Image: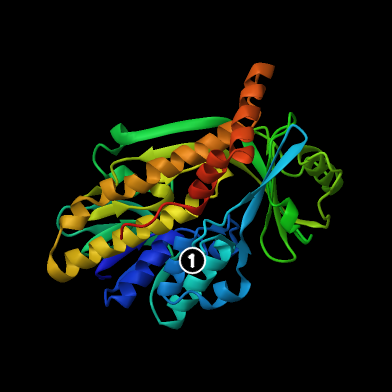
Amino acid sequence: MKTQVGIIGAGPAGLLVARILQLNGIDSVILERRTRAYVLERVRAGVLEAGTVDTLRAYGMGERLNREGIPMRSMQLCWDRQKADISLDDGTGRHLTTYGQQKIVEDLILQREADGLEIVFEADVSSLDDIENAPRVHYRHNGEVKVLECQFIAGCDGYHGVSRRHIPGSDEHVFLTEYPFAWLGILAEAAPLAARRGFAHSTHGLAVASARSASVGRLYLQVETDADPNAMSDQQIWDELDIRMDDGTAAQLNRGPIIERSVARLRGYVCEKMRHGRLAIAGDAAHIVPPSGGKGLNLAVGDARIMAEAIRRLLTTNDTTLLDSYSQMCLRRIWPTVHWACSMCEALHIFPGQTSFQTRMQYQTLNHWGNTEIGQQRLRKAQLGLPYEI
């Protein structure tokens, strides 16, 4: 099989790259290791920066988003039985939007299928070759070994994918930290309370309350890295959420049946070498942030914008200027965003062996963000996200 661009991975980054290229008259084939059903059902975070929303609208993906997206113009920080309500309105009309990543993926897949374009599900990519000149992707599908010949490879296959491993010397440019805790994430049929959306620091550990829709809540508890997601009953989870989100007012969260639960480890990871020859990586293949900042999807969209434009210039005018600076341009957004997400992570979680002094230092950070003008400005700017260069 031949195409102009081979895209590995049908997550937000790969699907968006394909969509942008399509609208610029460039053909692509997407290879995805998982089944179609798995990809459509995979639950991920869903807090979108204004730039992400604008991008999806610009490329024809705004209809459902406009209808179902929930504006998020404020957030709450809780610590030491107190709270701060922080405006996320910067005076320009920009705000965050809650719209699940699962829905974005579904929107992009359904649009691509409606346009009669190729997504090969259950395609297990084994290797890439000749990435300097005429790239080929080797994969297995339906029990057969196959080859996709293309002019460029977009590696959007995540942290465990094959793409990064084919960038020579990439391991020497990897920066990684593993946190000693995890998140128990739940979806619950319980209407989220606008006044209780945000983050809580507790001596029991972090808690997060957010929305997936007007009737479904997305909530998290800090747990051990080896925690069993089914170890706690629904009531125990709700009780623990209320304990951790105690803001001194005795207010409680709305409760309802928990319909999904999972445990995810937390890490910070950046690969600074994001391109070699006619291969570039984007999204989780290049970086992972702790979910405390809600930034992973938004960073992937930024990568996709730059990658798609770099590919367009390469294939239409043989201009490699943007491609040559791809890593550097992406990293100008990646590192400040990773820094913010890790700062939130380290201020909100209880670490093993944490002392009372260290807890007091966390209180000072949270008080600065929540109760000082300069701290609120810092938090608001970081949460709304950096502007796109491309």
User: Which sits in the foreground, 244 or 120?
Assistant: 244
Return the residue at label 1.
53
Picture quadrant where residue 387 is located = bottom left
Residue displayed at 63% across by 54% down: 74
Picture quadrant where residue 354 is located = top right
Residue displayed at 61% across by 24% down: 361
Q: Amino acid at mark 1?
A: Val
Residue 359 vertical position relative to residue 77 in the rendered view, above or below: above
Say which element carries label 1.
helix
Residue displayed at 27% across by 47% down: 327
Horizontal side, residue 350 vs residue 62: left or right: right
Horizontal side, residue 383 vs residue 167: left or right: right
- Give the percent coordinates (x, y) of residue 222: 68, 37
- Give the percent coordinates (x, y) of residue 170: 29, 38
Q: Does residue 124 appear in the picture of this structure?
A: no
Residue 79 vertical position relative to residue 302 in the rendered view, above or below: above
- Give the percent coordinates (x, y) of residue 92: 49, 62
- Give the percent coordinates (x, y) of residue 210: 68, 54
